[in-house]
Image (tube, grey):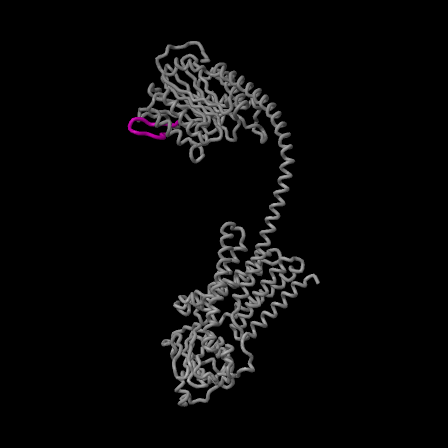
Amino acid sequence: MPHKKYIYIQILIILFSLIVKNNYAQDADYQIEKGIANIKKGLLDEDIIPLNGDWKFYPGKLLTPKDIKAGKAKNKAKYIKVPSNWNIKEEYKKYKYATYSLDLIHNHKNKGLGIVVKDIATAYKVFVDDSLMLQSGKIATTKKDYEPNFVTQELYFTPKSDTSQIVIQVANYSYAKSGIIVAMTLGSEVRQKLKQKKLNEVRLYLMGALLIMALYNIVIWLLRKNRLSELTFGIFVMMLILRIAVVDHVSTFGIINLLPWSIRIKIEYFTMYAAGLSIFLYTYTLYINIFKKIFFKIYTLISSVFILSLFVLPMYYISATLIGFQIPSLLFIIYVGVKLFKESIKNKEVRIFITGILIFFITVINDLLHTDNIINTEYIMSYGLFVFILIQAYLISKRQIQSYEKIEQLYSEILEINQGLDNKVKERTKMLEEKNKVLEQKEEYIKSGMSYAHRIQKSVMPKVENFHDYFKNYFIINKPQNIVSGDFYHMMKIDNKMFITVADCTGHGIPGGFMSMMGISLLHEVVLKKKLSRASSILDELRERVKTSLQQTGKRYELKDGMDLAMMIFDYKTKEIQYAGANNDLLIITHDLDKDFGERSKEIIRNDEKKLVQLTANRQPIGIYIKEKPFINNKFKFSPTDKYYLLSDGYADQIGGKLHRKFMAKNLKKTIFETSKYTLEAQGKVLEKINEDWMKTATKQTDDILILGFSISDNKKEITNPKLLT
């Protein structure tokens, strides 16, 4: 059969559960009926037996052994099954305290005996033969005098006869279950101590192994955050470690018993809720393709509600509503089990995984049924977990081996591919070298053409050496982006007027160069041929000629090329300056703090000695525009100490600096104001240095840069014939 091994494993699971269920002496060796335990002679030397059966029960009474012997019970004793929850019986439900009594016929005179007392809800006293042997919490007939606290305890005594009487007083006001809810065990003192020692050793060993596995999985998750299966499994194992310490009362963790009873019980419930949630999420992350996500969302919501209830509800309601968590958990176990079983038919790894998880789920079901006193076994979930973890360790190792084998295979394939690629790389390198040579030749040809275009452009622009005749002091910063610039400066003198222009044409490089050549040519036509001498009129006429040259009529898909431009006209006779601008402003540094430069002037910065004034241009270009208006002419008086600045937007728009942003117009104006204390020639060098430092973090120059700063001399001789300063 194809799944023969799988069937054998299921048989082992069944045997495992049968062994667990039958781990005590056979019922034929002792009987507990009507409050009397008749134990076969010598049995306690060989076995440890659970004291399960019918005990005498005195509801609503707190009696001592002497009270019972003296007949103070008044009412006849009733009988109740131990272990059990007296709250499930309608006739006892109203009682908050009661007394249990059991007469032992043990035939063990003068030999040490031991009783292990587990969960008695929720405060109790244990008497043996008139002596108080154990006490947990504080029993009382009123809630205000009562204190809950139940822990696993051991008591040892040496009977003076072959019979003994056990009397247990119990009180409970704070838990849904009342009475002896977990089986007590009886055996010889030697056997009981040996068993408890072995149990503690096994639990400590188990906790150590689980801790290593939990930390291993959590560390893997910390190194690779995308592997949620390791995180959920690590949390699951940590919850089980904490649960073993709390539920099994491991002696090494006796400090836990120092916590208030309600805190310990809430920790126990928390580990149950969190462990259930994390193991289901672990299964989901391993086999995400076979489950519907909505079911896990629902279970996560249910678990979260129960976990939150631990912080807001009293312990009585928490314990009473436990069934509300157990039912969805059992249904979810069935759902996960069915899905995994179907997948295991075609997937060997899932078959191994489902074997481990089935063992664990059987132990979980055992603990749930044992908690509800439906079956009489032990809490064995921690052992089922250990088996499950061993299987997970095997699967993890197997996956790692498969990963290594895949890596080795991929490595071999990569080596083969690399050998083939070497030849291709050499061939393509040779091809690229040849293409690079062609590209270098073409680049050299383009650069040669651009350099020639630059020389032509430079030839029609004013020669710098001629500036000394007409400017008192000046500087020019002219940095094209691509050899040929779209920005240009121009100057000409006609009669007694000096025309000074700075323009920024659309585009850079060759396209910008063509536009600048056209702009200079049209400027000559307007000033020299039409003899216009009003700055605003020159700009109006220049706009019309640009539109005509570029055939701009305002249609949607036409070119919107043009130029931004600032023009100054200085009249040597009247000592007046005209200014008109198309998007390009005029900046003026003056020491006359009261001087007025007209309506379109705006003071930017000032101190006690000087101020920076901006004459604002019309916000429209020289070219086609949606809302064209006549350009405005500005007039103001000349001062030989004033400094004038005409500029394009390239300096302000350059990206750079530590934050890799634009220099900005506001920062440029502030820089011009602060550096105006120098001569214009020195100021130009400072501005160039600032620009170079700013561009150190930039990958490239973003625009053509042009700034013309000057002051005008007023003592030159009159020129009667038009002269172009080139």
343 versus 48 height, above or below: above
Residue 270 versus residue 158 in the image, above or below: above
Frontmost residue, 551 versus 607: 607
Residue 119 appears in view: no
Q: Is residue 545 above or below residue 202?
A: above
Q: Quadrant of the N terminus?
A: bottom right
Q: Is residue 605 magenta?
A: yes
**Front residue of 489 and 383:** 383
Q: In the depicted view, which residue is nearer to us: 75 or 686?
A: 75
Q: Main secondary structure of the magenta part?
A: strand
Q: Is residue 118 magenta?
A: no
| Magenta extent | 602-614
Quarter-wise, where is residue 11 in the image? bottom right
For the question of whether residue 662 can be seen, the reply is yes
Residue furthest out toward the right: 1
Q: Position of residue 74 (x, y in %)?
A: 42, 89
Number of numbered discs present? 0
Query: Residue at point 37% right, 23% down?
Result: 683
For the point 60% across and 67% down, the residue is 13
Residue 65 lies in what quarter of the image? bottom left
Q: Position of residue 52 (x, y in %)?
A: 51, 80
Q: How far across and down, in percent of the image, does residue 104 sit?
A: 47, 84
Q: Give x and y (percent) for residue 317.
A: 46, 71
